[in-house]
Image (cartoon, rainbow, N blue to C red):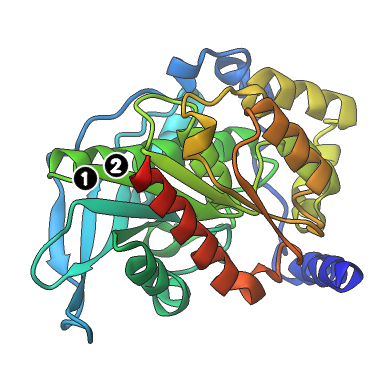
Amino acid sequence: MPSVARSVDRVVGTLSRFLHLRSAQHNTVDDLGPYLDAPLSVLFPEPVAPRDMVRRRARLPRSGGKVVETLRWHSQHVPLCPHYRARHAGEYARNQMVSARWLHPRTGPRKKALVYVHGWLEPGPWIEEAVLLPRFYDALGVDVLHVQLPFHGSRNPQSALFHGEFFWTADLVRSLEAVRQSCIDARTLVAWLRAHGYEEVGVTGISLGGSITMLLACVTPTPDYIVPIVSHLHLAEAVEDAPILWRMKTDLERFGVDRARRQDIFRRIGLERLAPALPPERQLWIMGKNDAYIAAPLVEQQWSEWGKPPIEWLPGGHMTFPLSLTRIVERTREFHEGLAAR
């Protein structure tokens, strides 16, 4: 199983070469000044509950009394780089509208919610809404919200070749702004839920979504709990070693940014050194023991630095974690019940 899981991850990384057909068009390394050694409050400012939230019934009531609503609001994200603001307001204008899908009982929202942050390159919410999120909804007894990341789905600019193309590239300013915007959009949704009567709001996410989930545990106010799945915050190592990030690494080399400079840039951004504000007992980590993208030794290092929260090791890798969905849901249910008991 270990060799099979890693092989699947490597094959997907190789196949991604047919997806990433073009190089990054902007070398923004010289514009990274505002991000290097910046305090947490600057990188991730605290949002407020949005006042322009628009709710719309997405479809007819589901079986079992569930309904889905679509939420839309204007992102509170403000880029740090002055040069990037023109692209943010122009070519990427549609990225400023945030969208989330809200699954709750037909009789009305309950008191507990779970926000789900999807992974990189996902075009829409359909797979999770069919396979994963209803299982969380039933097993945990919570309402579920699926927030859409920047440069994905309805937020993807028309100039992009595929969903998520503009999120992770050698255009480092745009990539860092995508991370910042992901955090503020997810935190805005959490703030809105709390302002509308939810007494408990947790956050979970897979892969890139898991990394965003971990960042939310480092900035106050935190969610009530987090469940990151197959993720960590060691971005420098991921760029160097993850096969699926080959284009980003290749383009940085083309820009003259060698390994030593790449490591220095990510070290000064400092995401891997962030300390959680959320206690370890309010975290559940679910990781792949044989992940070729999110290496287990790096997960273990960060897990130790974060106070060794509860961790569940899946036998597979990054692309084979769906084979363990039943285990993921059951372990999350046990963790959630433990929180209620405490």
Q: Which mark is residue 193?
A: 1
Residue under the point 72% across and 64% down: 21
Q: Which mark is residue 190?
A: 2
Helix, strand or loop at label 1? It is helix
Check if mark 2's residue and mark 1's residue have beta carbons within 8 Å.
yes
Is 45 above or below relative to 327? above
Report x, y in % for residue 238.
76, 44
In the image, is 76 to the left or to the right of 239?
A: left
Residue 333 or residue 72, whichever sits in front: 333
Report x, y in % for residue 304.
71, 31
Helix, strand or loop at label 2? It is helix
Residue under the point 36% across and 45% down: 341
Q: Quadrant of residue 66?
A: bottom left
Residue 169 or residue 179, whichever sits in front: 179
In the image, is 54 to the left or to the right of 77?
A: left
Q: Can residue 92 be seen at all in this image of the molecule?
A: no
Residue type at mark 1: give it: Leu
Residue type at mark 2: give it: Val
Report crowding for label 2: few under 14, some 14 to 19, many 20 or more residues within 10 A (C-alpha).
many
Residue 82 or residue 177, whichever sits in front: 177
